[in-house]
Image (spheres, helix red, strand yellow):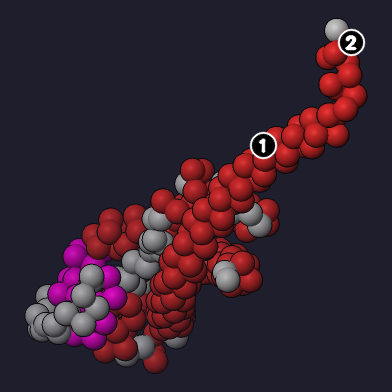
Amino acid sequence: MKRILTTLAEKWPEYILEILVLIIGIYGAFAVEEWGENRNKRTKEQQILKQLHVDYESNLKQLDQKIAMRKLIIASSSAILKSIDQPDSANRDSLITCLAHLLDDPTFDPINSNLISSENLQYISNPKLNKLLSSWSSDIAALQEIEFFWTNKTHNEYAEWLISSGLARDALGQYFSESDYTWLLNKEGGKKISIGNSKNSSSIRELMKSRELEGLAAYAIGINHGANEQSIALRVRIKEILNLLSVEIE
């Protein structure tokens, strides 16, 4: 025992040094491992951020297109109501053009990226950006709910009214002769077609007395105005996300 104590007394600095080296080695290994994990996480985060920036740039461009389409619907509907209020100045060709514009069904269809899944959001270190991305689905749901009302009006009530009034051929002919086919996958692939004009459509006088047309035009203004107001708010949100993404991207 005395020998052991003597040995400890003589070599304790050496033992302490060995212990310190061991501790430093263990902590160093943990530090290197943590550094590697953080580096991998940051690399993954940068990949996500860059792709999200591309996606949200596309979303912004599409949203602006939908806003422009709704503005045309609103302007055309306002012109229809003006013609109804002032029937003596109504022009049939202008009316048909306006009716064709009401055939548009602008719906915002953003890129459905799995990059904003809960699995990937854990890599987004900016808390504000993380929160905005997390609420994205609910933000667009509010707009799509309004858009659904106009889709329903267009494909049901409005289509039925055009057919019953004998204006379907005229309106569709005008629509397809000037349409930019923005809904196509190939934006440059749409071909203009001509289906002529109907000889069985309602007269301009009858149209100016149509309560259903007046109601549809009023609904078109109300619904599309509401959708654009929501779109403008969503546009601000997209710009905010893009700004935060730009700051975070290295």
Left or right of 2? Residue 82 is left
Q: Residues within 10 Å of mark 2 (few under 14, many from 20)?
A: few
In the displayed structure, 143 sits above or below 94; it is above
Task: Give the prevailing secondary structure in the magenta stretch.
Answer: helix
Q: Which residue is mark 1?
A: 26
Assess whether residue 61 is covered by the magenta stretch.
no
Q: Sequence-wise, which precedes: disc 2 or disc 1?
A: 2
The residue type indicated by label 2 comes to: Lys
- Number of numbered discs present? 2
Residue 108, image x and y in percent? 41, 63
Q: Which residues are magenta?
A: 161-183
- Badge 1 element: helix
112 or 19: which is nearer to us? 19
Residue 197, image x and y in percent? 12, 82
Left or right of 20? Residue 170 is left
Residue at point 27%, 59% (across, down): 155
- Badge 2 element: helix
Residue 173, can we see it?
A: no
